[in-house]
Image (cartoon, grey):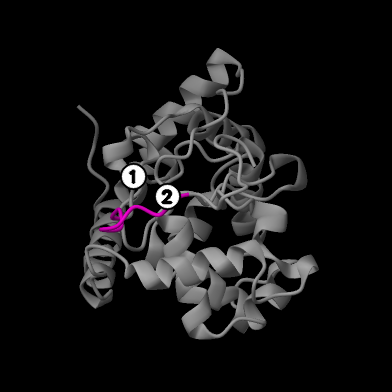
Amino acid sequence: MASRNPQRERRTSRFLAGLVFLALLTPAPAHAADPRQVELGRRIAEGAELPEARTCSRCHGVLGIGRPEEGTPRLAGQARLYLHKQLDDFASGARPSEKMAPVARALTVEQRGAVAAYYASLHAIPYPGAPWGDPELLQRGGVLSAIGDEGRGIRACQLCHANAGVGIAPSFPYLAGQYAEYTARQLSLWKAGGRRNDPLDAMGEIARRLDGREIEALGLYFARVRPPPADLSSPIPAEPIPPPPDAPSVAD
């Protein structure tokens, strides 16, 4: 029988209590975004409000699929409040990014909320084929996601991101189906201190204890997970928002 570690138990209890406190402080979003807000977000994403070089769809696509070859993540169906917070953080400098900061600063708070609502509404966008992965790496990523590594003080990903990384709205994003390179890069930024915009420094604390192989394993594991549509983080708008007239039905 494993011996108890009172110090680790106290640390874990404080962490979980902090998550509960954060959840209580976070305003609960309305069940569905206002269709007018979603429509405004679609127009902004298409380029109605910004110069072409700073249009959301230029990097993330009109349908939020992203462009992994350019390092841009999938946004389709991501939690609305989470997306809004990231845009605010890019604008304020809390999340440094030479590419995203000028875009976020060019938008008002209302416009950032509209863009977040639009991309959060895109639940039916297909995923690309799952990338091939070394079975040993995949297994390690799955273990870290499900149970972490207690001996090294690494908490399970699912504590915040839910089983198989489907996300817990409104604050914790989905990881399932996100591009492996993007997830690994964000973990590396947290590990190096280049990203610090989570309230409790939970990600920084975890990432600093991961080695490079484990970061790769987590990125690959989550890239292969395909969440059931009903488990995605954000509520679906009351009125369906059709794709723009000239947008492709699957890939953008």
Q: Residue at x 23, y 59 (%)?
A: 13
Picture coordinates of residue 73, whole percent (x, y): 61, 49
Left or right of 143? Residue 5 is left
Query: Is residue 105 visible to us here?
Result: yes
Residue 198: image tag: none
Query: Is 237 in the magenta?
Result: yes
Q: Residue at x 31, y 44 (%)?
A: 162
Q: Could you tell me if the residues under marks 2 and 1 are in contact, i.e. CB atoms within 8 Å?
A: yes
Label 2 vs label 1: CA separation? 7 Å
Residue 232: image tag: 1
Give amino acid for label 2: Gly
Q: Residues within 10 Å of mark 2 (few under 14, many from 20)?
A: many
The residue at which mark 2 appears reads as 77
Q: Residue at x 54, y 14 (%)?
A: 135
Give amino acid for label 1: Leu
Q: Which contiguous range is marked in magenta?
A: 235-242
Quadrant in which the C terminus appears: top right
* Frontmost residue, 39 versus 20: 39
Q: Residues within 10 Å of mark 1 (few under 14, many from 20)?
A: many
- Report helix, strand or loop for mark 1: loop
Tally of numbered tags? 2
Quadrant in which the N terminus appears: top left
